[in-house]
Amino acid sequence: MDYNKFSNYFGLIAHHKFPKPVQNLINKWYVKKFKIDMSEFDSVDKFDSLNALFTRTLKKQRELEDGFISPSDGTCLECKTGNLNTAYSIKNFSYKIDELLEQSFYKEELQGEFDYLNIYLSPKDYHHYHAPQNLQILNLLYIPGKLFSVAPKWLQKVDNLYSKNERVVIKAKLDNGSFIWIVFVGALNVGKMKFDFEPRINTNANGKRAFYTYDNLNLKKGEHIGNFELGSTIVIISKKGVISYDIKAGDKLKFGCSIGKA
């Protein structure tokens, strides 16, 4: 099965604006199917397509807690320390960070042990992502790839899945001078990822690998970075001890809530 082509077809349907009564029924079905809490968002009749519902924005900005905050809503699949270049998507299923990060990976910067966090965004989650801390964006790497589902059951079927899927890698510097890598992993269905500061990125469009560097590109903690269309995964990687996480696998995460200290 060509997952990328399937995602393109699904994207066409998701973007289609059906007659209002039909669209309202579709939206209500989707909200009920995935048990979406709409209390922070407009009512379902305000969205003129399924994609508009997928990419709904908050009616009111959330308050940001102290510390290193979750960049998105979602579920923590793993939050551990890795070594020998190996991290785990979920228990017993690994991926290689040099393959995940590719040319953004510098062995001397991640030599030895490193901390990593995998956040899974399901179809019911708020699909926007924000800066988890003040960030100086150093570079962005776009890597074309597959669009396998990133749901937990698929992580048990496809070895090294994160490193095979289409993804965008951002390398950034924290206020204390430490580096972190934030990886946005594409997924089955719509497969689009958008970035406010980089309009040249066009995912799931048979695009070519791209690498951009930036001077004086700074984002404040909580500032909007972009959004997924449908659900996906965010991976955060840093040298051991740069971020002291206080979450564990299975925890539900909300953008704006503290998940550790940096």
Image: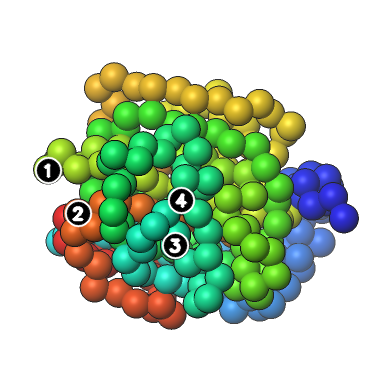
Question: Considering only order in the chain, which callout, 2 or 1, is on the residue closer to the N terminus?
Answer: 1
Residue drawn at x 35%, y 60% is 83
Residue drawn at x 56%, y 44% is 167
Question: Considering only order in the chain, which callout, 1 or 3, is on the residue closer to the N terminus?
Answer: 3
**244 is higher (above) or lower (below) than 186:** below
Whether label 3 touches label 1, CB < 8 Å? no
Question: Considering only order in the chain, which callout, 3 or 2, is on the residue closer to the N terminus?
Answer: 3
Examine the image and state in which quarter residue 145 appears. top right
Which kind of residue does numbered mark 4 sit on? Answer: Ile
* 3D distance between C-alphas at marks 2 and 4: 17 Å
Element class at badge 2: loop
* 3D distance between C-alphas at marks 3 and 4: 7 Å
Whether label 3 touches label 4, CB < 8 Å? yes
- Left or right of residue 217: residue 66: left
Q: Label 4 belongs to which residue?
A: 97
Dot 1: few (<14), some (14–19), or many (≥20) neighbours within 10 Å? Answer: few
Residue drawn at x 76%, y 59% is 23
Which kind of residue does numbered mark 1 sit on? Answer: Asn
Whether label 1 touches label 2, CB < 8 Å? yes
**200 is higher (above) or lower (below) than 130:** above
* 3D distance between C-alphas at marks 1 and 2: 9 Å
* 3D distance between C-alphas at marks 1 and 4: 23 Å
Which label belongs to residue 87? Answer: 3
Which label belongs to residue 242? Answer: 2
* 3D distance between C-alphas at marks 3 and 1: 25 Å
Examine the image and state in which quarter residue 45 appears. bottom right
Q: Nearer the viewer, mark 2 or mark 3?
A: 3
Element class at badge 3: strand
Dot 3: few (<14), some (14–19), or many (≥20) neighbours within 10 Å? Answer: many
Query: Quadrant of the image for the C terminus?
Result: bottom left
Total number of numbered discs in the rendering? 4
Which kind of residue does numbered mark 3 sit on? Answer: Ala
